[in-house]
Amino acid sequence: MDLEINKAEAKEILNKAFENATTDNYQPCSPFATEVNTILSETHLTYKYIMVTALLAKATSSKINPLCLQKGSKLEGAYDARSVCHQVVVPFEREKLFNAFGGSNEPFLNKPARIPELSTSNPVRKGRDTNLLFLLCEFLPKITSGEEAFAALTDAIYFALEQVKNKEELFNSFKRNTTSYTKIERLIEDLLIKSFGGETLALSAGALITLFSQTLQGNTRVEVHVVNQSGASSKEISDIDVYMNNQILYTIEIKDKDYAPQDVQHAVQKATIANCDRLMFITGPRGSLVNTSLTHADLIDEASRKGIYLTFFSYTAFTKMMLSLIVPQTTEQFFDTLVNIANDARMKQETLDYLIEVARKNSIIE
């Protein structure tokens, strides 16, 4: 029989761990501090949520099995880890930890958490992700008491807050140089040499749209969403949604890989459902329409019959157009806009590191 976790009690325990972790001169004291820090220092977001949820659940009820992910698990000590994560961990992370684990809305909808329990036989990418999975499977079962779990949980909160502080200090330490339109264009060209699953294209387009939206009258909001990641909000329409006075203005689909007509048609359908009558389709250097006799013109006509004004842009054409329209002062905000979008959209740490590398190369920062 599945075990029940008292979520009110779990919230109290999480808050107590936070109080302990934020006291003056706190130092990690759990026997598993090294393992906890290793998981949090890597870029696999789902494993971070899995670990923190397991530690919290074990601190709340010592009978649970920290390897369990779903209440359908046949392991003794199975419990509903997803509800603990989504109802307790996620709101707490948003309110007190500055989205330090990744800011995911529903991390247990991602593939690594959609299985009954952690096991070294679980499907995982080779290399670092495999090492993280093996590490979780090795050290979590060694936590046998609620006290040990609470100590490890407190360390996890401490390490998460330290990472947030270090990242903030890093970005504050950069000297921002005067930026020109040409420098921004070169920065985007260099940034898109690597894709990171389409994140660099979404980042670049999102920053340009954000700066352009500041020139519009009305209360505008640009939402850049996590690319190719489940657990996204049901309110999302496309990869970038632009609002004015809380009404959808237009939406943008990002493709930095080959795509078929079905991808375009699906984006059109989502726009239709959201009562959005304009859709931009921006392709990166790796984006191309394949496996079809249909042309962009055919797809545009098809969308038009559904009441959607569809346009296609290459990333180069889109960049040039946006740089021709933004006001001069916004060029100075470009790097900070990129960083803010990367953080808000929960992009990979590799994407953020690469952004810094490219910005330095182009003398945007030093």
Image (cartoon, helix red, strand yellow):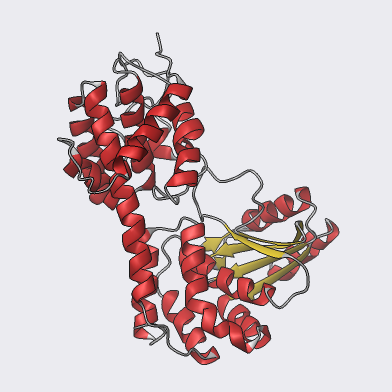
Query: Residue at position x 45%, y 19% from top?
Result: 6
Q: Is residue 176 above or below residue 126?
A: below
Quarter of the figure that contains the N terminus: top left
Query: Residue at position x 30%, y 20% from top?
Result: 65
Q: In this view, does 76 lie above or below 39?
A: above
Q: Can residue 256 be seen in this view?
A: no
Nearer the observer, 98 or 271: 98
Residue 51 in picture, x, y percent from top left: 32, 36
Query: Residue at position x 47%, y 77% from top?
Result: 335
Residue 255 in picture, x, y percent from top left: 55, 64
Count of labels in the image: 0
Query: Residue at position x 49%, y 46% from top?
Result: 94
Residue 233 in picture, x, y percent from top left: 60, 45
Residue located farthest toward the left when viewing the structure as drawn: 31
In which quarter of the view is residue 259 placed? bottom right
Nearer the observer, 336 or 194: 336
In which quarter of the view is residue 61 placed? top left
In which quarter of the view is residue 169 placed? bottom left
Q: Can residue 105 be seen in this view?
A: yes
Q: Is residue 51 left or right of residue 346?
A: left
Residue located farthest toward the front when viewing the structure as drawn: 24
